[in-house]
Amino acid sequence: MILKPSAVLGALLCLPIVQASAGSVTMQDMQVVGRAISFVEGPKRQPVALVVVFDRAAPASVREMEAVLEVLRQGAEVGGRSFRAVAVEQTQLGATRPGDAVFSTTGVDQRLLLTFVRQSGMPCFTLDTEQVREGACTVAIRSRPSVNISFSSRNASAAGVSFATAFIMMVREL
């Protein structure tokens, strides 16, 4: 099947907006992450194992982690794939088994995260564009007021992660 970038982007823009009960993460944010994960090249597992990294010392990071877990507890399913999220405090990354993707919350130490994503080969998603521009994450997403996806080919390459060409064509390179 050939996916037209305009059709995929259009589908992303039509996702319903559902607010999370805590923090600033919404169901729509996680749906955009789920759609982006579907463009990662390689085997697809069910459910998608999402490692949610947070900094216990940063209240905003803890709130964002809690919001991600709450949204995903509501039964997030994207493209017929469900999610299983595991919260991991940043200092425990070395003891964490890799999953399918990482979601990095606000304030996570980018050096610790960089080491983890390079060793695990997982793409890293975040709501914080600076974590893509200056850190370890591969993709930053925002779903409000409209869907905005930023991508770092440098960070993807460092983690050994490849995305489908259709995805790269419809996102903004940082």
Image (spheres, rainbow, N blue to C red):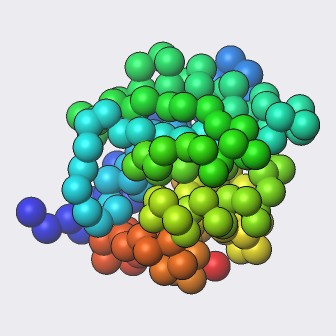
Number of numbered discs: 0
Q: Is residue 142 above or below residue 49?
A: below
Residue at 40% of width from left, 49% of height from top?
100
**In the image, farthest residue toward the front:** 95
Image coordinates of residue 142 in percent, x first then y, are 62, 51
**Does residue 75 appear in the picture of this structure?**
yes
Q: Quadrant for the C terminus, please.
A: bottom right
Q: Is residue 77 left or right of residue 67?
A: left
Image coordinates of residue 22 in percent, x first then y, are 73, 22
Residue at 37% of width from left, 73% of height from top?
162
Q: Quadrant for the N terminus, please.
A: bottom left
Q: Is residue 97 above or below residue 125?
A: above
Image coordinates of residue 136 in percent, x first then y, are 66, 67
Displayed quadrant of residue 114: bottom right
**Does residue 10 appear in the picture of this structure?**
no
Q: Nearer the viewer, residue 117 or 44?
A: 117
Image coordinates of residue 10 in percent, x first then y, are 37, 54
Q: Nearer the viewer, residue 17 or 124?
A: 124
Q: Is residue 143 left or right of residue 60?
A: left
Q: Is residue 44 above or below residue 155?
A: above
Q: Is residue 43 left or right of residue 12?
A: left
Q: Nearer the viewer, residue 129 or 156?
A: 156
Residue at 89% of width from left, 32% of height from top?
59
Displayed quadrant of residue 14: top left
Residue at 20% of width from left, 65% of height from top?
3
